[in-house]
Image (cartoon, rainbow, N blue to C red):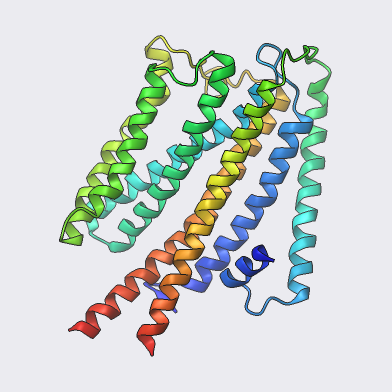
Amino acid sequence: MVFLHFVRSLLFRPLTPLRIVGCGVALSALFVCASAALAGAGAQEMGNLPQVPATPSLRPYWHVFAAYAIAIALIGGWAFSIARRLRDVEDRLTQQGE
Amino acid sequence: MKTDNVSVAGLRRGGMVLTLIGLAGLLLLFWLSFFWVSTEIRQGIVQRIFYVHVPAAWTAFLAFGISALCSAVYLWLRDDRLDRAAACAAEGGLVFATIMLTTGPLWGKIAWGTYWTWEPRLTLTLLLWFIYLGYFMVRHSTEDPEKGKRFAAVVAIVGALDIPFIHLSVLWFRSLHPQPVVVKPEGPTLPGDMLTTLMTGLAVFTVIFFGLFLFRYALEGLRAEADLRARQSTA
């Protein structure tokens, strides 16, 4: 719901169901095509790879998840910060226009 | 509404398209990183941090490079649009540099046994981060905004001079960082699936940066418009 409001406030006014479905289909198609193409291209390399050793502890998993979470949080934080500042400056412009 | 010659709606539309493509690509990158790419034999699972750490570094350097370039041309032409673009790129660069500087130590703790060490590449990268933090401090530290923009432009150019040293530091000095595995005279030495995942990460982070950059540039344009109206109403 919050994400839809965010998208709406940024671009689509009004946000029609057709547009939502269109965006969803387009993104899904992009995701599937890119995944299939990359998986096919990389599959040939897989045969020559060394065997994966057993991981000695679970600690590295937390480091990997934390790193990916930090990346998502900082990019998302920047996006929401821009959206908030855009809304503020638009409110200011609206007040100046009145 | 128009800011200069570019419509805000156009910037937003472009930004939205790029950001959505970038977010879809981010999902693809996460899938590749966690389920598809092979595990590096010496470091194990923690090496997968590579696929966000290096793209974040690349995007940060790209953003700082754009900021320095726009700043240099701003000092020459004194066009406010260039100053705005430089500030927007610098802000994005700072975000991606923060990702680089926080994900790297998480990897280093497992690979090197320590979160941080004052080796050349880490030190120069931290210096770059502080220089661009200083960019925003300098920008807002003068009573005359035009003077602040000029000073900040100089800081952006000086900061970008650090980037080649960061890249070459692993060749010039003894460093815990590995030697380059992609940008080499004889070509990349990464296995194919790792290179594919890395290139996907580079593309995704770059697209996300440019998507949010467009929104940020639209914001700066609107802010300049609001400031202009405020000055006119005061006069």
Can residue B6 be seen?
no
Q: Is residue A70 left or right of residue B174?
A: right
Q: Where residue B41 appears, x then y in whole percent?
A: 71, 13
- Which quarter shows the C terminus of chain A? bottom left
Q: Where residue B66 appears, x then y in whole percent?
A: 39, 46
| Residue under the point 59% across and 17% down | B110
| Residue under the point 33% across and 30% down | B127
| Quarter of image, res B18 | bottom right
| Quarter of image, res B109 | top right
- Which quarter shows the N terminus of chain A? bottom right
Taking depth in this image into account, of B96 and B184 the one nearest to the observer is: B96
In the depicted structure, whether residue B133 falls above or below residue B14: above
In the picture as drawn, the residue positioned furthest to the top comes out as B174
Q: Is residue B139 left or right of residue B187?
A: left
Q: Where residue A66 appears, x then y in whole percent?
A: 61, 34
Q: Is residue B15 left or right of residue B144?
A: right
In the picture as drawn, the residue positioned furthest to the bottom comes out as A98
| Quarter of image, res A16 | bottom right
Q: Is residue A43 left or right of residue B74?
A: right
Can residue B123 be seen?
yes
Q: Where residue B123 appears, x then y in whole percent?
A: 36, 23
Taking depth in this image into account, of B47 and B22 the one nearest to the observer is: B47
